[in-house]
Every structure is written in C-alpha cells, then in structure tokens.
Image (cartoon, rainbow, N blue to C red):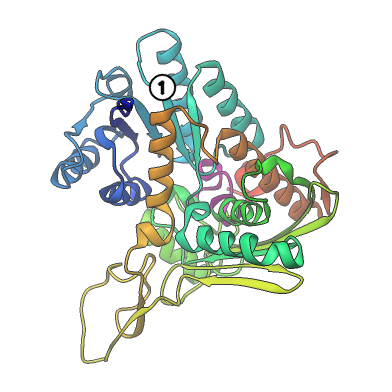
C-alpha cells in the first residue's frame, strides 16, 4: 500500500492594512481552505481591533491585533503577509519586511501584495528587488484575473474556438464606479495619480491574461507601444469638488490638486509569432449607475466572449414607497436604494478575490510560483507609466525606448494649481 505524503500545514497569514480592501479580502477567506488569519496590523488601534474581531467572529483566526508592524512580522504564528496598506506606505513597509527577514527576526516565507505594486516604476522595481533579495515567495493580487467568468470564458475560448479559428487578437476591458471610499485615493501624491493609477492596472492585466495562451508565461506576449488619455470630467468641477472636501476635509481639494477621474488606453502587443494584438481599456470614477461596473470581452476571427458584472442572474425591484438608509448591501459602490437593482450574489467570488486568495494560499503552501507575481506587477506599472506619459505628451509611447525609470505622473507630482 502506497503511503501518501502528509499535506503541508495551513498557511497562517498576517494582514497589513485593515481598510476597505482588507475587509474585502477577509470576506473572501470564508471560502478559502487551509488558511488562517492569525494577525493584523494597521496604524489605527480601533480599526485593527475591529478587523481582528471580525476575523475571529468568522472563525478564521485566532487573529491578534498587533500594536506595531514589528510585532506582526516577528509573531511566531505568521507564515505569510498580505500587504494591503495604502499606496504611499507600501514601499516603506516592504523595506521593513525585508529588514526583518534578512536579520532573522521574522520567519515569514511569502508575501502577496495588492495592486498597484508601486506608485511609479522605480518603486515597483524596488519592491521586486527587495522581495527577491529576502528570498520570499511572492504573488501580485490582481483579482480580475481570477474572476470565475474570466477563467471560465478564457478556458472555453482557447479550448473550443482557438484550435478552429486561431488565437484571439483583441481584448477589451472597462471598469467604472462613482469614486473611491477613502481620502488618500483622491490625493495624487499618496495614491500615485488618479483613476489611471487606481483602476487601469486591473484592465490592462486582465486583458493581457485573456490574450495569453493557457500555460504560457505572461512574458510570452511582448508589449510594444501604449497610447493613453486622461480626463477631468466630474470631480474637478466646483460643486463636486466641494462635496469631496465636505466629506474628507481640506486634505482632498480637487480644485487645487486635481486628479483624473477618466482614463483610456490602447496597448499594442506581439504574440510568440510576431502577430499584432491589442488591448483597449477605459476606467472611470465618474460613472453613476447601480454600482461598480466591469465589462470584459475577448475577440477573435470567428468568436467573441463577453462579461458584464451588472448583468447578474439576480435582480430586485424596490418601489419609491420602500425607503431605507444608504448602503452597499446589493453591489459595491451602490448608488441607489430604489428601482430595478442588480444583486451580485457573491461579490468576493464574482470579482475574483476568493479564487485569487485560494490560489496564493496553495502556491505558498506547496512552494509553487503563482500565476501573478511581483514581476507581473512591475510590468503592469510600466504599462501604466507609459500611458500617463502618452497622455501628458499626446504621443504614442514605445515601451522599448521610453525612459520611464524615474517618471512620475503629472497628477502625482507637486500641486498642479497655485497655493
């Protein structure tokens, strides 16, 4: 009788960050096996305590709210880190992780980082250098790649359509909502820009994923050139800027420090045989509909795949006689409580967070390389920086020759309006 080797133990995860995206990840772990949320650190005591309580209530712990980053990194019950802190703290946090591991104070062996990997290419490259020098396994958390519709649609297209009609050549991606939840997203220097930095990283990478042959590395497609544009459509107008200032305080002033709320991208690539491919993408913080809208499509010579997050199987109608408080119990970035409303039954699953975290956990447990790593995160930032440069100069940017290493997007530089 053959004896099977014992499976590796469950992965004990420490969260850095306890804000909106951390709570979304926490929700997804309700459906992830072989993992425990054993610790959390964020600068605000009340928020990290509430996060730990939520993890323990979900029986995902026991989870400890640590009073310092050092305490989390040196805790004996933390094997891996999920880095979910705001963009402007990410590199500093990665440096602390690197130092703790290299000095032998920390026993963590893996790290997964939310998008974007850096606010610019220099930061992203340093993130990669630090994680490699520390000898850590690494994964880049790009949830849309793991969305069930994306994985299933790509499988069907490449398995059934491509053998008969050839590879797909055009991917389209759009993501829109009415604006971020926290003040730092609206601050160009802290976030890295506006909606191009915040959301285009999703769109370009899911497009690249759909166009990549199954089993092939993302590097099998060569990005050649990018053309981008940005717009200041809604939130830099006086009445809307005043609304943001009233909600978030003087630190968010889009009249004096504007960031873009609309962005478009056209990216040209080459496949393994040198044939041209295209990704078209648009993102917006100026969309008011039922809530978050993600539209994706993949096209070839005799086929097409389409997905829209606001066309779910479940919908409800609430008349004007039914009134209640504002919330997001039906769909993320919900903008209404009445009328015909779509319901995303399982947002963490539909948007890809559950499968993403399941994949990262199993890769880290078994010593496998995730399909999205910090290397992919660097390439995404390189494309986004090229798009910002294109928008700033009005030219198509050749990524092979463009000097993007020290480039910082205009909305992330010093204030754009006089003090």
Q: Is residue 345 left or right of residue 96?
A: left
Few, some or many C-alpha atoms within 10 Å of disc 1 (few <14, some 14-19, many ≥20)? some
Residue 407 in sight: yes
- Residue 193 magenta-highlighted: yes
Q: Is residue 231 visible?
A: no
- Residue furthest top in the image: 103
Q: Is 251 part of what is drawn in magenta?
A: no
Q: Work out whether residue 15 or residue 406 is closer to the camera in this orientation and state it.
A: 15
Instruction: Please identify the quarter of the rendering in which residue 379 is found.
Output: top right
**What is the magenta range?**
187-198
Count of numbered marks: 1
The residue pinned by badge 1 equals 109
- The majority secondary structure of the magenta stretch comes to helix
Position of residue 353 relative to residue 13, above or below, is below
Q: Quadrant of the N terminus?
A: top left
In-image side of 196 versus 405 (left or right): left
> In this picture, is 185 found above or below 161?
above
Residue 333: x, y in percent?
Answer: 39, 66
- Above or below: residue 32 compared with residue 112: below
Image x and y of residue 213, in percent: 67, 51
Q: Position of residue 329 (x, y in %)?
A: 27, 68
Q: Position of residue 390 (x, y in %)?
A: 77, 52
Q: What element carries label 1?
A: loop
| In the displayed structure image, the side of residue 119 where residue 112 appears, left or right | left
Quadrant in which residue 357 is drawn: top left
What residue appears at the point 61 percent right and 39 percent down from the top-left corner? Answer: 376
Where, by quadrant of the figure, is residue 360 drawn?
top left
Q: Which residue lies furthest to the front in this view?
A: 1
């Amino acid at each position: 009788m053959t004896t099977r080797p014992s499976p590796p133990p469950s992965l004990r995860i420490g969260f850095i960050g306890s804000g909106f995206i951390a709570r979304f990840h926490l929700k997804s772990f309700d459906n992830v096996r072989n993992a425990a949320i054993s610790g959390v650190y964020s600068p605000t005591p009340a928020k990290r305590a509430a996060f730990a309580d939520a993890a323990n209530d979900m029986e995902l712990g026991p989870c400890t709210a640590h009073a310092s980053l050092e305490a989390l990194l040196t805790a004996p019950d933390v094997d891996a880190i999920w880095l979910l802190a705001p963009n402007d703290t990410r590199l500093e946090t990665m440096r602390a992780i690197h130092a703790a591991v290299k000095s032998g104070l920390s026993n963590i062996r893996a790290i997964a980082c939310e998008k974007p990997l850096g606010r610019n290419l220099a930061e992203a490259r340093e993130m990669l250098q630090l994680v490699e020098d520390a000898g850590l396994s690494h994964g880049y958390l790009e949830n849309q790649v793991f969305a069930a519709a994306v994985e299933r649609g790509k499988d069907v297209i490449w398995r059934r359509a491509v053998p008969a009609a050839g590879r797909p050549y055009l991917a389209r991606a759009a993501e829109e909502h009415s604006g971020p939840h926290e003040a730092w997203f609206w601050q160009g220097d802290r976030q890295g820009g506006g909606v191009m930095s915040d959301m285009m990283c999703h769109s370009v990478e899911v497009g690249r994923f759909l166009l990549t042959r199954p089993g092939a590395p993302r590097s099998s497609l060569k990005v050649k050139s990018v053309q981008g544009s940005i717009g200041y459509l809604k939130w830099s107008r006086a009445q809307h800027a005043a609304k943001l200032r009233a909600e978030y305080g003087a630190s968010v002033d889009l009249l004096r420090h504007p960031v873009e709320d609309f962005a478009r991208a056209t990216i040209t690539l080459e496949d393994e045989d040198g044939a041209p491919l295209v990704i078209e993408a648009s993102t917006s913080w100026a969309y008011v509909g039922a809530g978050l809208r993600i539209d994706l499509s993949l096209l070839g010579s005799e086929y097409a795949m389409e997905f829209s997050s606001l066309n779910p199987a479940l919908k409800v109608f609430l008349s004007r006689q039914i009134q209640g408080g504002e919330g997001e119990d039906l769909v993320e970035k919900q903008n209404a409580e009445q009328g015909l409303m779509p319901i995303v039954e399982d947002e963490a699953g539909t948007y890809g967070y559950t499968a993403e975290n399941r994949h990262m956990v199993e890769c880290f447990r078994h010593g496998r390389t995730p399909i999205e790593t910090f290397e992919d995160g660097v390439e995404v930032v390189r494309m986004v920086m090229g798009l910002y440069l294109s928008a700033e100069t009005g030219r198509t940017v050749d990524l092979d020759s463009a000097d993007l290493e020290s480039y910082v997007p205009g909305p992330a530089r010093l204030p754009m309006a006089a003090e």
